[in-house]
Amino acid sequence: MNEKAAPADERVGLGAGAGLGAGAPVLAFDVGGTDLKAALVDSDGRIVALTRRPTPLDGERTGQAVVAATAELAADFRSAHPEVVPTAAGLVVPGHVDEEIGVGVFSENLGWRDVPFRDLATAAYGLPVSFSHDVRAAGEAEYRLGAAAGFRDVVVMAIGTGIAGAIFIDGALFTGGGMAGEMGHSRVADGPECACGGRGCLEAVASAAAIARRYTAISGVPVAGAKEVLERARSGDPAARRIWDSALDALALDLSHTVALLAPEAVVIGGGLAQAGDELFVPLAQRLDGILTFHRRPALIPARIGENAGVIGAALRARDILSAPAAAGVSRAAR
């Protein structure tokens, strides 16, 4: 396989000795804009195999290529670990997802439209399949096992290649027919253009990819990612400082809208940009506090599970459908 295997102490991603708990053995697949992650979970809740490979790109047939790649990984897992026999699978993807009918409606970053992922995956794996949005799955992992546990009203926000969130209201995951949580496509500025067709979307200003892209556009200097832009800002590069500050301003403005509408107790932030730590969370909290007036100030909390949250959420959802088959696209979070 053309993948990267996780070291044993990083397989679960929930901290040393932690796991998903006892339950059915399942397969889990998390499709991202850059990488596809796959995991095999045993009946004790241990991730016994975790691999990563580049997300296959094939134009309008990228969705079908993704399903074929995950089916290949499933076969490899079965060959390498015959003692673990999965009884269901969880598949999560980015973009606009209709969980009720199992369709990936649209992904601006990966280019598919109306792909019947659940039906295709069910046929390819020969197993019942839970199909969901990648950020909502990661949000469920944080809500059940991570930093969002203990809150009834909370938003889990992922800032990486794109920006999206999982919204929990009174203990239930709200999906809005697959459209809720798309804060990355709310308008916060006059530009630049966004891949969705809009202008000034949060994702086009403040995602990790956008920060790197915008810095290169104004400086002429290619950078590897947002981390390098922050390093340059830290060392006094005025262009990098300008880009970083504008991203923080945009994030604070967007969060102020979220707070005014939903009044969450906390906002849990994950994804690549959250790795900036205090350099993200401290100025972001200050900016948000400066915008809000009478509103509830939510705690801004780093996500705890880490980069494997999506695949862990996919595994949790795969187990859910075995106990409640009609819940393959269910929008309520089990506690």
Image (cartoon, grey):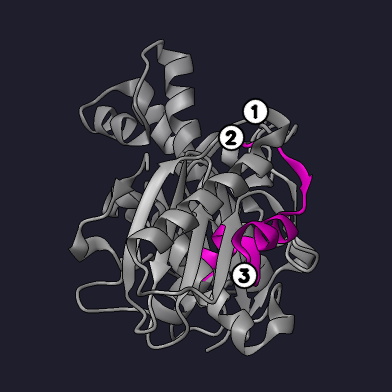
Q: Residue at x 52, y 67 (%)?
A: 314
- Amino acid type shown at disc 3: Leu
Pointer 2 residue: 204
Q: Residue at x 50, y 76 (%)?
A: 316
Q: Looking at the rendered structure, which numbered label has been put on residue 191?
A: 1
Give the distance between the C-alpha atoms of the residues marked 2 and 3, in whole angstroms. 38 Å
- Amino acid type shown at disc 2: Ala
Q: Which comes before the other along the chain, label 1 or label 2?
A: 1
Judged by depth in the image, the label closer to the viewer, 1 or 2, is 2
Pointer 3 residue: 127
Within the magenta stretch, is there residue 268?
A: no
Within the magenta stretch, is there residue 136?
A: yes
Q: Which comes before the other along the chain, label 3 or label 1?
A: 3
- Give the residue at the far top of this rendering: 220
The percent position of residue 277, horizontal first and vertical second, equals: 29, 53
User: Does 19 sit left or right of 323 as displayed?
Assistant: left
Which quadrant of the structure image shows residue 241? top left
In this picture, which residue range is highlighted in magenta? 110-139
When the figure is inspected, residue 251 is found, relative to residue 122, above or below; the finding is above
